[in-house]
Image (cartoon, helix red, strand yellow):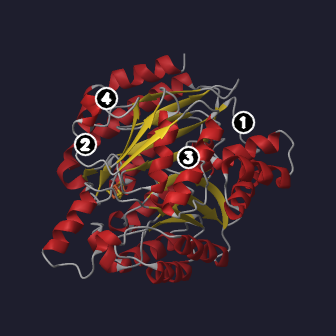
Amino acid sequence: MQIIYIREDKFQYDIHSLFKAFYPQEEARVLIGEKGDNPDKEKDISAQDEISFIDVNKSKNELKKEIYLLLSEKTGKVLPWGDLTGIRPTRIAMNLIDEGMSDDEIAEYMKGTYLVSDEKTALAIDIARREKEILKEIDYENGYSLYLGIPFCPTTCLYCSFTSYPIGAYKNLVDDYISCLKKEIDYVAEAFAGRTLDTVYIGGGTPTTLEPEQIRRLIGYMRDKLDMSGVKEFTVESGRPDSITRQKLRAMKEMGVTRISVNPQTMSDETLRIIGRQHTVAQLMDAFKMAREEGFDNINMDIILGLPGEGSEDVQHTIDEIKKLSPDDLTVHSLAIKRGSRLFEAIRERELKGELKVTMLESMNNTEEMMEIAQRGAKEMGLEPYYLYRQKNISGNFENTGYARPGKAGIYNILINEEVQSIVALGAGTVTKRVYNEGGRIERCDNVKDVKLYMDNIEEMIERKRKLFL
Ligand code: SF4
């Protein structure tokens, strides 16, 4: 546990994020005042490993730089993104491009202000320029994008942080769930009439837990109700290979889906078993080949770096196997497994029983080397980086990066990341964002996560959107 004391209630969130970037596995608490001033908050802290006192009487950037240098000296770590927390690096680069700065000037600014490494600075600028090019045909003002969430999966992966229910136990609810989505589609048809629908993304969960007939019914309804003539990309996440069948692929293709995602996460059967994915590498390969046979020419694959027990050789193996399939898009995620999470506890239990060969809890982290292997692999596959985002407390303070073949980049991924266009989100656990054109102000409204509550309160979910888009 790291406790940081600050003099006034300022920049708490930023200070906390920076500490977590250096100590991803540890808890950190930022308290106002001196030691002893917060008896309520301090009483449950048994071991105070560290106490720092920070004077916040400075600008945010100055303060973060000072804390960064202090922690860097203390831990011996240099973070690739420097003290940049809470701001999207590509957004900074994009804004500076809009201001007319050259790449050299942007690089100088990012390195000087946030201590970002040369390599990451170049990556952010490269991606920002590519994003601008890809988005140039998107009408932010009159256009919108649509997200539909299907919160069911074949089984729940141990590391899952999404809204997900095992399909086996929820099968009887799916038709009613689709009926609720249809009601939300009716609202969209009415509220967004005359506006251009630019991209559609069906995610989850695992949308391919729906039966072929359900896929046809849902997308067919959407096609009947909404003007889809301006849609530039229609993605359906088909993440879990154990949910994919030829009939489902056929149904998606017939209904005009242009992009799917078939996700290995790793090409090691042993790791898949440990993280509770319950499918094999062979199943993944079969599903991918089937998707190609059914005519999908834009297939994304997701992989995760930092999985339990995996080192650089395992990442290299995953990349080598993926290369054989040659996807059009590759998304590289960094995983940070927190103490107390389901995956952490499951691994600890199995280690204690002697079922796992090594002390995996010690090795769950991605590294610069793994990031480089993935980056090099993507390049060798002809894929270019086109979006990146950083999660809070991400392992090693790295990032998630999307790579794609020219012309195959996921437009929706950029839109949701850069928050430049309104996205209407339907289904349990989804968040709708309204982006105002003046000043880029953003307002959100969410649908409840619990699938039954969502269905019971569908009219209220619609009402929330109605108010947001008044
Ligand atoms: S497939 Fe994705 S959404 Fe479903 S349980 Fe696994 S991690 Fe969660």
At numbered mark 4, what does the secondary structure look like: helix, strand or loop? Answer: loop
Q: Residue at x 27, y 57 (%)?
A: 156
Frontmost of labels 1 and 3 is 3
Residue beneath disc 4: 38
Residue beneath disc 1: 139
Q: Quadrant of ligand 1?
A: bottom left
Marking on residue 67: 3
Q: Residue at x 45, y 39 (%)?
A: 221
Q: CA distance from mark 4 to mark 1?
A: 51 Å
Q: Is residue 357 left or right of residue 432?
A: left
Q: Quadrant of residue 149?
A: top left
Q: Is residue 179 above or below residue 470?
A: below
Label 4 Cα crowd, 10 Å radius (few <14 / some 14-19 / many 20+): few
Q: CA distance from mark 1 to mark 3?
A: 41 Å
Look at label 4 and name its amino acid: Asn
Specify which label sits upstream in the sequence, 4 or 1.
4
Residue 48, visible in the rendered structure: yes
At numbered mark 1, what does the secondary structure look like: helix, strand or loop? Answer: loop
Look at label 1 and name its amino acid: Asp
Frontmost of labels 4 and 1 is 4
